[in-house]
Amino acid sequence: MAKISRETILEATIKGLNKAQKKHLKWTNDEEGVSNGAEYVLTTYIAETIGDSEDIGSVYVEEHIKDLYEAVGKKAPKEIEDYSRKGGRADIAIYLKNKNPLAIIEVKNSVKNQEKVMLDITRIKQLLKDEVIEYGIIAFISEFQKPSITQQDVEKMTLDLIKNCRYGIDELQYKYMTDMFHPTEASNDSMWAWSSVAILFSKK
């Protein structure tokens, strides 16, 4: 069976982000977007969407970084702990059917600038350097309240944020980034405008 494509994982990530946002708006009667809520809501819906695919082995939430290293027969370096949060865990880890790690996804909420994601990018780069994963993804929703801001404003600010993330990494890694940017069609019945974003980092 063919390995699941990066594009499929990116699309599933975007789908999970959108589902989480719509669910959260429904739960809160449109009073609060998911970016102002628990990050775990985003993580759960992304993991669920990816886990529905038959072309992957397994999906873990809050996976220990050391377990990813052990899966490829390596010991996690001390410096990886300095890049880690929550006791050295990845928000989502994806494994192939042969038990080898494929990717990790770091999920963020309330992303308004590149500083919010730079620690996660640094950790993904370390995992790529050590050849533990094939690629890593940063996933988040860029969200603002209407009517002070329009959907078009959100799209522009999101693209600027992605551009800033590119400038925040070294030249080599810049060459191996894939953006998936999904400007959601905002409902006139909602006070929220948002865009879902997944940024993929790889070595090749």
Image: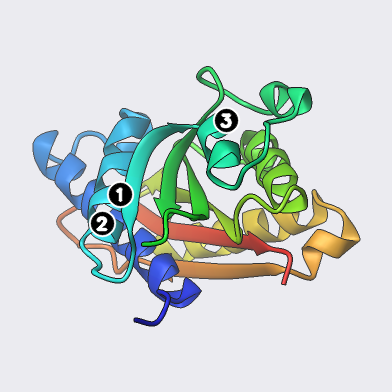
Of residues 65 and 194, the one drawn nearer to the viewer in this rendering: 65
What is the distance, in whole Å, between disc 2 and disc 1 at their CAs? 6 Å
Please name the residue that numbered disc 2 is placed on: 51
Upstream in the sequence, badge 3 or badge 1? 1
Position in image of residue 126 (x %, y %): 74, 43
Using the rendered image of the protein, determine whether residue 54 is visible from the camera's viewpoint: yes
* Mark 2 Cα shell of 10 Å, populated few (<14), some (14-19), many (≥20): some
**x 56%, y 24%: residue:** 88
Please name the residue that numbered disc 1 is placed on: 47
Q: How many marks?
A: 3
Type of amino acid under label 3: Lys
Upstream in the sequence, badge 3 or badge 2? 2
Using the rendered image of the protein, determine whether residue 112 is visible from the camera's viewpoint: no
Measured along the vertical axis of the image, is residue 119 above or below residue 2? above
Type of amino acid under label 2: Gly
Q: Nearer the viewer, mark 3 or mark 2?
A: 3
Position in image of residue 181 (x %, y %): 49, 68
Q: Tell which residue pokes out farthest to the front in this image.
A: 73
Q: Are marks 3 and 1 in contact (CB under 8 Å)?
A: no
